[in-house]
Amino acid sequence: MDHQPITSLKSVRLAVAAPDFQAGLSFFVEELGFEVAMIAPAEDPTYAVLTLEGMTIALDKNRISEPVTLEIPSEGKEIIGTSKQGPNGTKVHYVSYVREVSKNTKQIPVLNVAQVEKANWVTGRAGMSYRSLIDDQKSHITASHIKIEGSGQVPDWVHFHDVEFQVIYCLRGSAKLVYEGQGEPFIFSEGDCVLQPPHIRHRVLESYDDLEVIEVTSPSDHATYADRVMELPNRSYTPEKDFSGQRFTFSKHSESKWEKYPGNENLVTQKTSILKTSGGVGWVNEIRAIAFQETNEEPILVNHDFEPDFFLWFVVEGSATIIYEGRKINIGVDDAIICPNGCRQETEFYLAGFQEDFRVLEVGINPH
Ligand SMILES: [Fe+2]
């Protein structure tokens, strides 16, 4: 069987049976707004080709087939959510042009540990596999560990996401990425982080050496749209462009300086500029140990004077013991401490038994 697409096509139309031809014609033309492109025969028509907003239908008195259902996206608040039934069984539903995101009710704040040895890896297309760091299916946010095996081209196209906050951190390997307005494609490698502001067009071109990334996205229920018009890379260079109050950011591993981590003298932190460039929506910091620590008398406070909507510590290197809510768990490379449903004022954990190689990625989303 040959699966090559046929190249001699002229158009595609939906065949609609219309035993009551005149009633069907006036429903499509007068009520729905279709235009007549062709009608035959002139005397007593039994066949018409009708078009509306890129859709073509062939209304046919002599066809015997099931009635059709049309979904019509609209910007008109007064008709969104309404339905119509036409002659010959035709059904019409008016829906929102913009995909509505369901705002779930607030979930109960919890602190979870996601251990890599208990991970459920899901295999996707083209050698890609995903591991959710969040158990709760109803969480407003997704945090995933994503792997692409080997090296090679990634079958991606120019697209964008309808998100409020989205960051990608490179754990291992590297990739060649291109973003709207940011010039030539660039190499994203270990320790680098990208802030993808809402609706920025982008494309993954290639991945190398078993790429592994951490991706955090809010909200989890968001739409991805293909952009079939914009080509990337292109000549437009607008690095300062504002996307809903955010700016594209490529944070290189080596660029910012290390400072003391509040409340623990054996830890230092390297803050990326993402808190600033996301307009305060979220932040990405790296934390590492500078000395061995056997026990910890002071807890790591997840909040200081605010309650984040989301908090993640992902262990990049080394190991430690965490103590929280009376439990003691050893965490190592690729394990995570996560508050997927926001944090309470008193959310805290104790950290002990870490060596100098202990290194974590911290991602947080501020309350809004
Ligand atoms: Fe994307």
Image (spheres, rainbow, N blue to C red):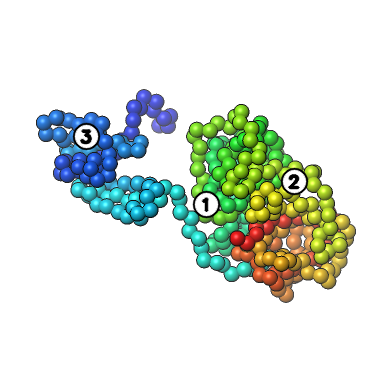
Q: Dot 2, crowdedness within 10 Å: few (<14), some or many (≥20)? A: some
Q: Alpha carbon of mark 2 to alpha carbon of mark 1: how far?
A: 26 Å
Which quarter of the rendered picture does the C terminus lie within?
A: bottom right
Question: Which is in the foreground here, disc 2 or disc 1?
Answer: 1
- 66 lies left or right of 257: left
Residue ID for mark 3? 48
Q: CA distance from mark 1 to mark 3?
A: 39 Å
Q: Which quadrant would residue 184 be assigned to in this image?
A: top right
Q: Disc 2 marks which amino acid?
A: Gly
- Location of residue 358 with respect to 196 vertically, above or below: below
Give the farthest residue toward the right: 291
Which is more N-terminal, label 1 or label 2? 2
Q: Amino acid at mark 3?
A: Ala
> Which residue is tagged 1?
222
Residue 240's spot in the image, x, y percent?
Answer: 65, 40
- Write down the residue under mark 2: 191
Q: In the drawing, does residue 185 fall left or right of residue 270?
A: left
Residue drawn at x 25%, y 48% as measured from the top left = 90
